Structure formats: C-alpha cells, structure tokens
Amino acid sequence: MSGHIPEGFPRGADGRLHIAGRSAADWVAEAGDTPLFLYDRALLTARARSFRAAMPEGLGLHFAIKANPLPELLRHMAGLVDGFDIASGGELERALAAGMPATRISFAGPGKRDRELEAAIAAGVALNVESAGELDRAGAIALRLGQKARVALRVNPPFALKGSGMKMGGVASPFGVDAAAAPELLRAMQAQQFRFEGLHLFAGSQNLSVEAILESQRQSVELAGKLTAEAELAAPPLVNLGGGFGVPYFPGDRELDLQALGRGLAAILAERPAILGESRFALELGRWLVAEAGVYLCRIVDRKQSGGETFLVTDGGLHHQLAATGNFGTVIRRNYPLANASRDGGEAETATVVGCLCTPLDRLAEKASLPISKVGDLIAVFMAGAYGRTASPENFLGHPPAIEKLV
C-alpha cells in the first residue's frame, strides 16, 4: 500500500479488500466495469454522528455539496445534516431533488446569473450575497416576482485560516465583500424586498490544526459581532462560520482531534459578543464529511519497465480523480493512500501507478510500495469521496465516465 488507509476497509481471508462488507472484486462484477467509485453510506452516517457527538449542542451542520453531488449520496446526506450549501443553479436542482427543503439551502458563489438568482428566490432559498451589485440584482428580481428574497451577506474576512490548503480570507478576493464594506450592505438588506438571514464567513479549508481552526473561528465570531454592531442591527438569525476541517491525505498527516475542536468551539460560542446572543451558528463542511467514505477502483491493464522503473498502467486516471494525481491545487505532489485491492502481503515491489491518458501528469502514485501486481488486479485509491469525478476533466480524450455507487 501507499499512505494511510482510512478505517472501514478491511481485508478478507483471501487478502482482497472489502468495502461495505463485500470484496472490491464483487462490487466491480456487479457494476460491470471499472473505473468505479464506491461510497460507503455507513461511513457517511458515522461521520455525521461523530460531529454531533463532539460539537456543542445547537451548532448546525451544513454539507457543501460541491464536494460530492451524486444524487443518491445527496439523498442520504439530506437526512444527516441541517442544510445544504450550493454554488450553482445545477446544484440547486440537485439539492431540491434530494429532498432538502428550500428553507434549509443556502446559495453562495461570486458569479450567480440572473436566472439562477430568480430560481433561488422563487424557491425560497437563502442567497449568500457576494457583492453590492448582486444585492441590487436580487432586489430587482424579488420586486418583479412580488416576494421577498432571503439574503445573507458573505464577508471576506480580514484574516486567513493559517496552514490551510486553500486560503479564503485575508487577501483581495472575488468571494464575499470586504469587512469594511459590510455594514453598509447589511443596512441595505433591511429593505422591504429582503428578508435578512445572517452572515457567512469562510476563512480557509483543508486544515489539520485544531489551534488554527479555533483561532480562525474565534476571530470569525468576533467579526460577526463587530459588523452587526456597526450596522446597528439585531442579532443575525444565522452565522455560517464556514468549515476548514481537513482530512489526512498524506503520510504524516494526523486526523483532527474532534473532541478538542468541540470543546474549543463550545468555549468560543459561550463567550460570543452579547449582540449575537440570539443568533444560531453552523459549520459548512464538505470533504471532511465525505472524503474518507469513498474509494476509486481501477484495473491494471498493462505492466512495463522503463529506465529501471516499474509502471502499472490502469484504466483510470486524472480524468476521474484529478486530485489524486496532484493536479487539483497541490503545490508538492504526494501520493494519496493507495493499495492493490486484489492481493495483500507477499513479496513487495516499488511501482509507479499511472492512468490511461496521453499526458505525464496522469500519475496516481509515484514509486509506491505494493505487492507484486499483475495485469487484471484492481487498484484502490482511497480518500476518494470528495472532489472526485465531478472535479475532474472527465471528457479529456474521450474515455468513458467512471461508474458511481452508494453502497
């Protein structure tokens, strides 16, 4: 194997990898082909329950569905979380089709088109407004429709989540409005055509430091109180504090201490500014909820030697799993957890696992330690539940799409 394999994926007596109680080979036979994404519903449920058990009572849990918008998975997640966060009209359709009530959906994103604003307002979805211009357009549409637009203000915080895989604050940004401009827009949201829903702050993502996450959330709560006071408003109904919870993709990464995070967040909320006394709070999580529940299975179709190195060529690759190849925002390429799903133990080899595309970027693992692997063996790439198929260039070179199953 290469890297730390998440819990929940045991080996059978024959050495074959098991997923949701059945071997990978059985799932492939049932699906009829590879590549194949499998998402374990029991692991998804356990993840959401672990959040509830560790976090302070009343802290809401929202799912950012961009992490994995598979319809079957969304229907399952709708029963586990308090709301969906979306970023397009297409995601709006999927969220509603999954059974999530419109009143529990929020719509963020800096480039909402008028038809998307209209669909969201008509459905009763809350808009996380990203600019003064967007607020003006939403107001005009609401007046034309003869109904109030549910609006929250997304604020670009003047601080970043330190150590994040992707920083979302502390710099000039297309996301949200700068904190200095927020009070004026908050006052504008009190107009007749709007129903004010609260604040949305997002300082960064994919962070594995409890201390950094808590410091960012402390600053976010303080900022929410400061902006509310400056705008001379009553308590915002909801303060969406974003997320930032990371997952351990690479060797040396450590799982977040959820209990420590829960204790810290409880203390922060207990000490929140008095003006936020009646506000509700929520966290918006994506990859943390779904990444570890997913496995990507592909099949070795060739085995070759070049320059003294062994290459295992699979029928998968970056057109389905861009992130695992290191081409989705990674500065230094490192291997995702990966294993031969068909065999375990025995004599080992060092091999580079590549995909089927005509580009040197298509590498699923560089010089990984694996059992001596044969043509026909299945390769399992773990941490595949988030930013997989829909975050990858699926149409590149015309290969067929991967199959996806919630199991």
Image: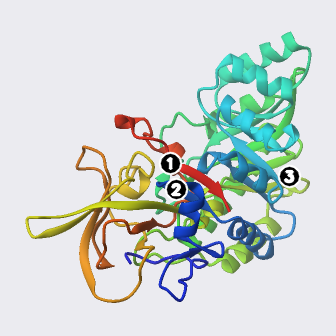
Three-letter code for the amino acid on which mark 1 is drawn:
Ala
Query: What residue is rendered at 53% in x and 83% in y?
Result: 11
Query: What residue is rendered at 51% in x and 37% in y?
Result: 173
**Residue 36, numbered circle:** 2
> Residue 42 location, x and y as percent?
72, 70
Report, in whole angstroms, how far the alpha carbon at label 1 lies from the one at label 3: 50 Å
The residue furthest left is 307
Q: What is the secondary structure assignment of the residue under circle 3?
A: helix
> Residue 388 location, x and y as percent?
51, 51
Give the colour scheme of this rendering. Answer: rainbow
The mark nearer the N terminus, 2 or 3, is 2
Determine which residue is flagged by label 3.
Answer: 275
> Residue 237 location, x and y as percent?
87, 46
> Residue 343 location, x and y as percent?
41, 80
Mark 2 packing: few (<14 Cα in 10 Å), some, or many (20+)?
many
Report, in whole angstroms, how far the alpha carbon at label 1 lies from the one at label 2: 5 Å
Q: What is the secondary structure assignment of the residue under circle 1?
A: loop
The mark nearer the N terminus, 1 or 2, is 2
Tell me where residue 233 sits by quadrant.
top right
Tell me where residue 144 sits by quadrant.
top right
> In this image, 350 relative to 254: left or right?
left
Mark 3 packing: few (<14 Cα in 10 Å), some, or many (20+)?
some
Three-letter code for the amino acid on which mark 3 is drawn:
Ile
Three-letter code for the amino acid on which mark 2 is drawn:
Leu
Q: Is residue 317 above or below residue 12?
A: above
Q: Is residue 163 above or below residue 166?
A: below
Assess whether mark 2 and mark 1 are in contact (beta carbons under 8 angstroms).
yes
**Residue 402, numbered circle:** 1
Q: Which residue is more in the foreground, 160 or 308?
A: 308
The mark nearer the N terminus, 1 or 3, is 3
Query: What residue is rendered at 46% in x and 57% in y?
Result: 165
